[in-house]
Image: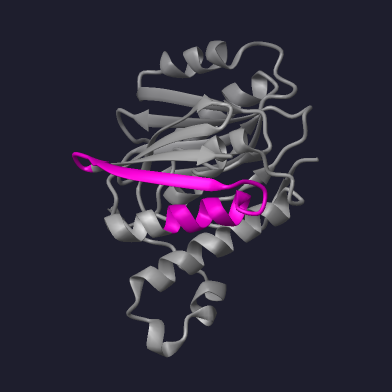
Amino acid sequence: MLAPTHNELFPIYRLDTERILCEVSIRLAEDRPGILAIISNIFADNGINILWVHVNSLRRTMYFIVDLTQCPTSIEDVLEKIRSLSFISEVSYKTIRGPLLIPSYMRPTFRDKPVVVFDKELLQKIAPTEVKSLAKIASLMGMLDARYIRYMLSDDVMIEDLLELLNVVQLRGLCKVAESKLVNNNIIKVMLSECLDEDFVTTYVECFIRGLLGDLYNIEINTLKNGDDIVFNIFFD
């Protein structure tokens, strides 16, 4: 089953094992009429279905979520045709096979500056006396996002899924996910950069992880500063 949640700022897709989705980020060397049509035709000619597209004209970037299931060739061959166009500066991509596609190239901005995304449900749960408590807001945000993702996955969340699911912290606008890797079967290392607020991000991530997997595992989370980055070592037992 392939289904976007709703018409959201950045859609999250649930995948089945037969679907292959891909994120494609394209940076333009110049902006001119017809670029989107040219790129869309290249995708269509190669059996690639565009599910979602976002254009940031200020940064001259285009971001696509595409379905590769019916593509008869490799995505690299298709993107090489796009790279050869004179108005293209840079192309990057990431293929996703499940369980969720949470965009990893996107971060919300307003007037080309990073912003944090709050939703109505979150604001309704914050009492007036807690409005100034960043820790309370961060913990509620992490728990609500974990609950939402567990609902999408019917509570069937595995440790290795966290590598993809943690991209939600970037969609919230809190930071960039610089690195996430499975060290072994029960240890995950995550590095976050460009954090808007270190304590807020740390609280959010800890509540999000415990909300996802806390009833299945004993979880220990160690954090450390690495220059301007925050590194999380997450142990599951």
Q: Residue furthest left?
A: 227
* Residue 55 percent location from the top left of the image: 44, 44
Residue drawn at the location 40% of the way across and 59% of the way down: 203
Q: Which quadrant holds residue 226? A: top left
Q: Quadrant of the C terminus?
A: top right
Residue drawn at the location 44% of the way across and 52% of the way down: 205
Q: Residue furthest bottom?
A: 128
Which segment is the magenta one?
Answer: 204-228
On the question of residue 103 being in view, the answer is yes
Residue drawn at the location 18% of the way across and 39% of the way down: 227
* Residue 147 percent location from the top left of the image: 64, 60
Between 123 and 181, the one nearer to me in the picture: 181
Q: Is residue 82 above or below residue 133?
A: above
Q: Quadrant of the N terminus?
A: top right
* Residue 26 percent location from the top left of the image: 42, 30
* Residue 137 percent location from the top left of the image: 42, 71
Left or right of 233 on screen, residue 72: right
Q: Which colour assignment does the render follow? A: one colour
Query: Residue 179 magenta-drawn?
Result: no
Between 218 and 45, the one nearer to me in the picture: 218
Residue drawn at the location 77% of the way across and 35% of the way down: 16
On the question of residue 111 being in view, the answer is no
Q: Is residue 226 above or below residue 110?
A: above
Q: Which quadrant holds residue 60? A: top left
Query: Residue 221 magenta-drawn?
Result: yes
